[in-house]
Amino acid sequence: MGKEDSSEEVCSSEDMVTNLKASIRELSGKVKEQNQRKCDVKVKLQQLRERINAEGVDVSVQEELIPLLRSLKELEKQESEVRSNCEAKRSALEGAVCDMEERVAKGEIPEEDLDVLLVESLDHLTSAKKELAATLREIVSLKRQIDDVPCQSELLQYERRFSELNVCIQEKLQQTRKLYGTYNALLEIKDLMLKEISLLNSIGSQFQDVIGTPAGRVKLIDSMEGVMKGIQQKLGKVQLGLQEEQRLCDASKEKHTAAAAEQRKCYTVLRAFQEECIRNDTLKSQVSAVNSTSSSEGMD
């Protein structure tokens, strides 16, 4: 009976040792997988740097990438620390396994101690898995942030769309201002016509009664003078508006004249540049012909 119990304890100890070895192998596999993902992230970052240099991303995007790259370096540093800790733990566990194998072979370790060691090893393995998962989540989050940064082609597309939208808004604004101006002008014409009709109706209805007495005639003259003053004030406001519009029109004409002169100057410079290009091509062809003639004579 004593031999059977000792053999069962040895078998149980060997099973625990096997489980510890499996845990160590699993931890080593996780570390290798993390190293492989780290290499993949480094390769993709290098490709991203090459694409940034090739496409010429502007300064704002580069400044946005700098803190992300710093975060990646910090994560790599943390990863190296975690890996070194894992290596140290693995070495310690391997040493403990070897020591345990020797003690199990000698029958020095009771079953209770093996259970305690197994529980501690499983706790270490679980904590290592949690640290590895947290590091991998940070790496994936950083990779997504880098992928969310728009490239140069996307920025150019956004700029083009915003320019088109700005042009549409300006056109709609000019059209709205024109319609409001037309509406205000028609409203003023309506008010003047209503006042004119009211004045004519008043004069027509009261003219015969007022013109017969001197006081009525004086009152009519005063009323007409008041109407004339109101018309003069209205005419003055209209003339001021006309002068302002004329001033704006003159300024627009001056701008148009300056733009036309600048356009003519550009055409003149372009024509001179084209002539110089033609002259340069002619000189190049002449030089090429002279060089070919000299080389053929030298060979003769």
Image: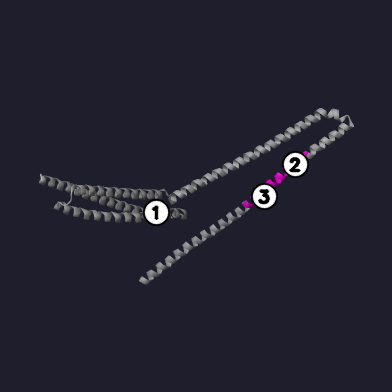
Q: Residue visible at 38% across and 50% down?
A: 142
Q: Residues within 10 Å of mark 1 (few under 14, many from 20)?
A: some
Residue 49 seen in the figure: yes
Element type where label 3 sits in the image: helix
- Does residue 28 appear left or right of residue 233 in this picture? left
Residue type pointed to by label 1: Ser
Among the two numbered marks 1 and 3 on one chain, the one whose residue lies closer to the N terminus = 1
Labels 1, 3: front one: 1
- Position of residue 120 measured from the top left corner of the image (x, y, whole percent): 26, 49
Which range is magenta? Answer: 230-255
- Position of residue 154 measured from the top left corner of the image (x, y, whole percent): 44, 48
* Count of marks, rendered view: 3
| Residue under label 3 | 250
Q: Which secondary structure class fits the magenta region best? A: helix
CA–CA distance in space, label 1 to label 3: 60 Å
Q: Residue visible at 76% across and 41% down?
A: 233
Q: Residues within 10 Å of mark 3 (few under 14, many from 20)?
A: few
Name the colouring of the figure.
one colour
Labels 2, 1: front one: 1
Labels 2, 3: front one: 2
- Position of residue 202 measured from the top left corner of the image (x, y, whole percent): 79, 30
Question: Toward the viewer: 93 or 178?
Answer: 93
Residue type pointed to by label 2: Leu
| Residue under label 1 | 71
| Residue under label 2 | 235
- Does residue 113 appear left or right of residue 151 in this picture? left
CA–CA distance in space, label 2 to label 3: 22 Å
Q: Quadrant of the N terminus?
A: top left
Quadrant hosting residue 205: top right
Residue type pointed to by label 3: Asp
